[in-house]
Image (cartoon, coloured by chain):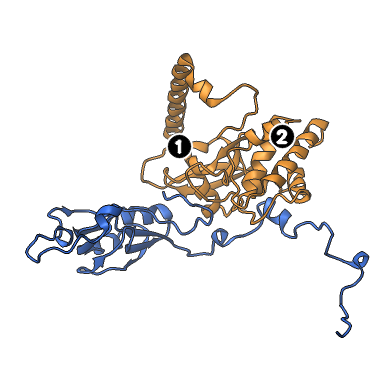
Chain colours: A blue, B orange
């Protein structure tokens, strides 16, 4: 085996390894000077709030975005879903509003109205499993839409500017 | 949110006291009344942007916001003082800690209008001098930062705590800073730094 030649210097000559070196950004961070992404306040930045469905399975039957477009501070409204689209999970986005101030965007999202036909969903592990094969004439309750309707889905604030937050508001 | 290190004092014990409960509600009513009076004096109307003059870091700052806007949003969005961080907005994490009349408070749970006539000090105010605050130096020395998002909140909380409790022990510090959360888990460094700060405060140094 050929002799190996290593490029390491002597331990006493090391600049980094084995030395205690203060973190380069510690003072900037601890004194609040450091600017994170959420700290940049460039002119014209808008605040967004999202409108999501609180039901796990539904069909969107009505969505009115026009009313909020003229609300104070509102600059843009975007629809993720169209009337007739299916909602497949709780929290699926329906629309988003961008406004000059956070509270204005919140107001606009709260003013949004959507109507949806609820469909079957199950959060129980036993009920969610596919039942035993049965005769084609037997009622199949698990695919029949429920009778009642929601008139208004509740607005939930989904905040994407909170890097350390695990809690939903 | 307990910052006091007074031995033998706990909020639970305080609230358990039957007489104390009455006293607590009386205090709450008094606070509500004083806030209502201040709002009246400032001409604040719900839903209407109002001009507020706030004393922040020794400077008088004027902002025009609705009464429902929090102090944190005013600091961060209107005044660009982004040292106080917005993390949980539900008073769980302590990242938005500022000093109101010298006492630590959570800016996310204060309306800007509540702070009229009060002296607000942010982390920027504590470090506005030529030299960094001694607490920051201790944080650097003991490597009490990692991602650094919680650190300004910890810095303000530590400053207020060691000023009020010079020479506090490690246990007292752990309780006193219990309202702040660091998800990187730099608690070891933070505790060491705070112990040194408390010792410095006892020595008479700043």
Q: Quadrant of the N terminus of chain B?
A: top right
Residue A56 sits in which quadrant? bottom left
> What percent of the width, then of the height, locates residue A165?
50, 52
Outermost residue to the left = A137
Please report, as a chain letter, where disc 2 is located.
B
Q: How far is the residue under mark 1 from the one under mark 2?
A: 44 Å
Question: Does the image show residue B64?
Answer: yes
Q: Mark 2: few, some, or many residues within 10 Å (few <14, many ≥20)?
A: some
**Labels 1, 2: one chain:** yes
Q: Is residue A161 left or right of residue A143?
A: right
Label 1 is found on which chain of the structure?
Answer: B
Q: Residue furthest top?
A: B19
- How far across and down, in percent of the image, does residue A129 sit? 26, 59
* Marking on residue B110: none
Residue that mark 2 sits on: B170
Q: For the point 65% across and 52% down, which residue is it? A: A32
- Counting every numbered tag in the picture gives 2
Disc 1: CA contacts within 10 A as few (<14), some (14-19) or many (>=20)? some
The secondary structure type at the circle numbered 2 is helix
Which residue is drawn at the image coordinates 70% and 41% (left, top)?
B191
Mark closer to the chain start, 1 or 2: 1
Query: In the visual, does A17 lie left or right of B41?
Result: right
- Residue nearest the observer in this picture, A134 or A156: A134
Q: Looking at the image, which residue sits at the far bottom? A: A2
Up/down of B54 relative to B146, above or below: above
Residue matched to label 1:
B42
For the residue pair B156 and B111, the one nearer the viewer reads as B156
Q: Which of marks 1 and 2 is in front?
A: 2
Please tell me whether mark 1 sits on a helix, a strand or a loop: helix
Q: Where is residue A78 in the image (x, y as percent from the top left)?
A: 33, 68
Q: Where is residue A59 in the image (x, y as percent from the top left)?
A: 20, 64
């Amino acid at each position: 085996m050929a002799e190996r030649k290593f490029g390491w210097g002597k331990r006493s000559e090391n600049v980094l390894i084995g030395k205690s070196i203060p973190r380069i950004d510690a003072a900037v961070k601890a004194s609040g000077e450091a600017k994170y992404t959420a700290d940049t306040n460039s002119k014209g930045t808008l605040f967004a709030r999202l409108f999501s469905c609180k039901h796990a399975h539904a069909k969107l039957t009505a969505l009115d975005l026009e009313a909020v477009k003229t609300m104070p501070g509102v600059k843009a409204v975007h629809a993720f879903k169209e009337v007739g689209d299916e909602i497949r999970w709780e929290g699926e986005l329906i629309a988003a509003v961008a406004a000059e101030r956070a509270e204005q965007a919140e107001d606009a999202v709260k003013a949004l109205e959507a109507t949806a036909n609820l469909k079957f969903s199950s959060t129980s592990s036993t009920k969610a499993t596919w039942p035993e094969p049965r005769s084609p004439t037997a009622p199949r309750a698990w695919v029949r839409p429920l009778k009642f309707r929601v008139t208004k889905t509740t607005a939930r604030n989904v905040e994407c500017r909170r890097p350390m937050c695990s809690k939903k508001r | 949110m307990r910052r006091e290190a007074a031995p033998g004092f706990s909020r639970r014990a305080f609230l358990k006291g039957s007489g104390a409960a009455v006293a607590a509600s009386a205090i709450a009513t008094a606070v509500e009344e004083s806030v209502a009076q201040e709002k009246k004096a400032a001409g604040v109307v719900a839903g209407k942007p109002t001009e507020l003059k706030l004393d922040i870091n020794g400077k008088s700052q004027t902002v025009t916001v609705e009464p429902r806007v929090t102090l944190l949003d005013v600091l961060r969005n209107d005044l660009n003082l982004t040292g106080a961080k917005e993390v949980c907005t539900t008073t769980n994490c302590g990242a938005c800690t500022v000093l109101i009349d010298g006492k630590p408070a959570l800016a996310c749970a204060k309306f800007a209008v509540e702070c009229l006539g009060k002296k607000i000090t942010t982390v920027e105010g504590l470090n506005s001098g030529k030299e960094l605050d001694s607490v920051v130096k201790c944080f650097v020395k003991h490597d009490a930062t990692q991602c650094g998002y919680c650190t300004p909140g910890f810095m303000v909380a530590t400053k207020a705590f060691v000023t009020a409790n010079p020479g506090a022990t490690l246990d007292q510090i752990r309780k006193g800073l219990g309202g702040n959360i660091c998800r990187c888990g730099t608690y070891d460094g933070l505790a060491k730094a705070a112990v040194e700060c408390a010792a410095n405060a006892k020595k008479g140094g700043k």
